[in-house]
């Protein structure tokens, strides 16, 4: 029986327990140790009243994190410890066996309540010790429970778990692949999978109409604090479905997961908003909907004001957009001035603001607003006494070609919500964002890129424009490609967002070869190149491919949120650093010349 599960109902039993010496206290006449196993802590007491002298002497010499086996009677404690689940009982040791001696620790496992953690680099170097911390072990219990819940739900929904290859074909139009040289095929390379995307589509063509996999994926991209080069995703694909079928399954899975792990009942269906609506109302495609604060476009109203910066937007694609913040007129001048730096983080030159009191308006453009402009401004913004309005002027994503300022309003909105304490920490705000752009423009290469991936079905209303632009059996010229970007051509791609985080991405897929060829042409991929890179997919589409769609949830990020962790590395057993190094095992590392020769590689000095 694990030590950490013992309670008063187990008192009076003779037990043999094993674990680690978490904490050791020698009080002269008696010795106490906290025995730790995966289930928790239990106090073990060594007292001459029940412990033989030789065992007493051995107990005094125990080092922290040594592994021991103890035997004795479980009894009620004289002085219960209410902070421990096992705090009402203790094991009164009659025998002790030292299974493994620990040397002095490079990092501590036991810490006092106010003791700070060692540096993350040191903890990753000694990860086997860091993973002994109760909070990290709890994270992995949550991870296990989440994986079990996902598998159980999808099994009940009729999905089959199918494993797809780890050694795959290198593919373009995505992040950089991790390449694996072939020993038996000189000069040829496999790629490690960025996702099972093409395989799961081929499974749909093969007749496996409901597939899932908790899949390992790898991407060789520049890392950020919230990214890992290898990660896990819940990968799902379905045949004969549309968006609403996908949403129903995904919402059911997440609701089941939140209920089983957190005991929280989620409201379904989740709200839906298009990409265009999300950008217009919140300045981001992953809005935090735990609070309101929508963006308001006041361009036409404020162009009539006697304010040069506003008047300069007339006849251009620049817009004037801002946020009304109820009650924020009470912010100090320092707090309002701080908004300039917040907006600059999002790419704006700064902000303009006014606030309303019972006496009227004050602020940077208050004097420029007189009736009828003032009344129109109040009507457009809903500004009431006690409110603040913060505006940004310039190019936005849905108008003009400049560097878009949507991100500045997103930064301002989140910052003001935190400042005004509008974020409900207990709220679980899920939503679907739909109809993402089909393409994005690569200004350096003067060409289109797939915004999601090149296998995403175009929006039905934009198919005609796509086919018109790609009528010639050749890659489209830059002028036609730019026109598709400016349309903008929409896709049937969607994201699931939660409290301002993107947690899933998916789409309705292309299932006919002609539409797929048209997408390749728009992306500058000609017939010959498409045949080399994607011929196996185009061939499969020739023999009866069903309509299909799917999604992938980032499993690591889901677990991080479920566990209340703030760092992805706290829910991954052996994570990489932000420079993609594994400090514990020392990867990546050099290999000798014989290995290079066997793989038909030649090393060069970096």
Image (spheres, rainbow, N blue to C red):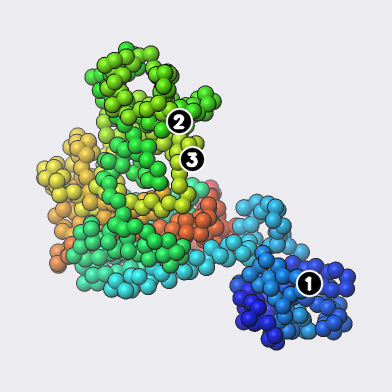
Mark 1 and 2 residues: CB-CB less than 8 Å, in contact?
A: no
Q: Nearer the viewer, residue 170 or 550?
A: 550
Q: Secondary structure at mark 2?
A: helix
Q: Residues within 10 Å of mark 3 (few under 14, many from 20)?
A: few
Q: Secondary structure at mark 1?
A: strand
Residue 557: percent from the left, percent from the top?
45, 56
Vertical relation: 140 (above or below) 122: below
- Name the residue located 20 percent from the left edge and 56 percent from the top edge: 510
Q: Which residue lies under the disc numbered 3?
A: 421
Q: Secondary structure at mark 3?
A: loop
Vertical relation: 421 (above or below) 387: below
Question: Can you say which quadrant of the picture contains the N terminus?
Answer: bottom right
Residue 19's mark? none
Mark 1 or mark 3, which is nearer to you? Answer: 3
Mark 1 and 3 residues: CB-CB less than 8 Å, in contact?
A: no
Q: Nearer the viewer, residue 568 or 431?
A: 431
Task: Locate residue 478 relative to residue 250 in the image: left or right.
Answer: left
Residue 328's mark? 2
Q: Residues within 10 Å of mark 1 (few under 14, many from 20)?
A: many
CA gap, disc 1 to disc 2? 56 Å
CA gap, disc 3 to disc 2? 11 Å
Vertical relation: 313 (above or below) 589: above
Q: Which residue lies under the disc numbered 1?
A: 32
- Name the residue located 85 percent from the left edge and 82 percent from the top edge: 49
Vertical relation: 430 (above or below) 572: above
CA gap, disc 1 to disc 3? 46 Å
Q: Nearer the viewer, residue 458 or 116?
A: 116
Task: Locate residue 434 relative to residue 77 in the image: left or right.
Answer: left
- Name the residue located 31 percent from the left edge and 42 percent from the top edge: 278
Task: Locate residue 506 relative to residue 409 in the image: left or right.
Answer: left
- For marks 3 and 2, the one nearer the N-term is 2
């Amino acid at each position: 029986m694990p030590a950490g599960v013992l309670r008063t109902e187990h008192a009076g039993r003779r037990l043999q327990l094993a674990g680690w010496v978490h904490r050791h206290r020698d009080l002269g006449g008696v010795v106490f140790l906290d025995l730790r196993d995966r289930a928790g802590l239990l106090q073990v007491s060594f007292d001459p009243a029940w412990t033989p002298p030789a065992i007493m002497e051995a107990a005094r010499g125990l080092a922290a994190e040594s592994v021991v086996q103890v035997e004795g009677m479980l009894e009620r404690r004289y002085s219960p410890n209410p902070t421990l689940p096992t705090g009402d009982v203790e094991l009164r040791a009659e025998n002790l066996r030292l299974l493994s001696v620990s040397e002095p620790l490079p990092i501590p496992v036991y810490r006092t309540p106010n003791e700070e953690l060692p540096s993350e680099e040191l903890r990753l170097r000694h990860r086997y010790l860091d993973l002994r911390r109760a909070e990290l072990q709890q994270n992995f219990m949550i991870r296990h429970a989440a994986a079990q819940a996902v598998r159980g739900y999808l099994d009940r929904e009729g999905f089959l778990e199918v494993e797809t290859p780890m050694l795959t074909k290198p593919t373009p139009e995505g992040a950089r692949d991790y390449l694996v040289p072939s020993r038996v095929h000189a000069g040829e390379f496999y790629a490690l999978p960025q996702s099972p995307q093409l395989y799961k589509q081929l499974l749909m063509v093969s007749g496996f109409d409901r597939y899932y996999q908790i899949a390992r994926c790898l991407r060789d991209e520049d890392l950020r604090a919230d990214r890992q080069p290898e990660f896990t995703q819940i990968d799902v694909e379905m045949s004969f479905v549309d968006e609403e079928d996908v949403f129903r399954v995904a919402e059911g899975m997440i609701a089941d997961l939140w209920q089983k792990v957190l005991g929280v009942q989620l409201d379904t269906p989740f709200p839906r908003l298009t990409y265009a609506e999300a950008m217009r109302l919140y300045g981001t495609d992953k809005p935090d909907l735990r609070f309101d604060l929508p963006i308001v476009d006041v361009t036409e109203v404020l162009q009539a004001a006697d304010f040069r910066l506003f008047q300069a937007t007339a006849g251009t694609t620049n817009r004037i957009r801002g946020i009304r913040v109820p009650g924020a007129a009470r912010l100090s001048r320092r707090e309002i001035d701080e908004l300039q730096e917040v907006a600059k983080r999002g790419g704006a030159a700064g902000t303009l603001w006014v606030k309303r009191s019972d006496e009227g308006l004050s602020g940077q453009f208050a004097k420029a607003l007189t009736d009828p402009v003032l009344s129109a401004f109040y009507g457009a913004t809903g500004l009431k006494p006690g409110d603040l309005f913060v505006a940004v002027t310039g190019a936005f994503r849905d108008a003009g070609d400049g560097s878009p300022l949507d991100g500045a309003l997103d930064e301002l909105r989140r910052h003001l919500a935190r400042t005004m304490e509008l974020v409900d920490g207990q709220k679980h705000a899920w939503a679907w964002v739909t109809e993402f752009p089909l393409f994005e423009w690569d200004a350096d290469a003067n060409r289109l890129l797939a915004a999601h991936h090149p296998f995403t079905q175009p929006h039905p209303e934009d198919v005609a424009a796509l086919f018109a632009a790609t009528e010639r059996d050749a890659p489209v010229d830059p002028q036609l490609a730019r026109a598709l970007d400016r349309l903008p051509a929409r896709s049937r791609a969607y994201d699931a967002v939660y409290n301002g985080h993107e947690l899933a991405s998916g789409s309705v897929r292309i299932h006919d070869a002609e539409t797929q060829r048209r997408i390749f042409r728009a992306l500058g991929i000609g017939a010959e190149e498409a045949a080399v890179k994607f011929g196996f997919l185009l061939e499969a589409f020739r023999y009866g491919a069903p309509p299909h769609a799917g999604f992938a949830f980032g499993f690591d990020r889901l677990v991080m949120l479920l566990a209340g962790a703030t760092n992805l590395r706290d829910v991954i057993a052996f994570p990489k650093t932000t420079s993609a190094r594994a400090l514990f095992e020392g990867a990546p590392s050099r290999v000798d010349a014989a290995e290079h020769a066997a793989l038909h590689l030649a090393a060069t000095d970096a």
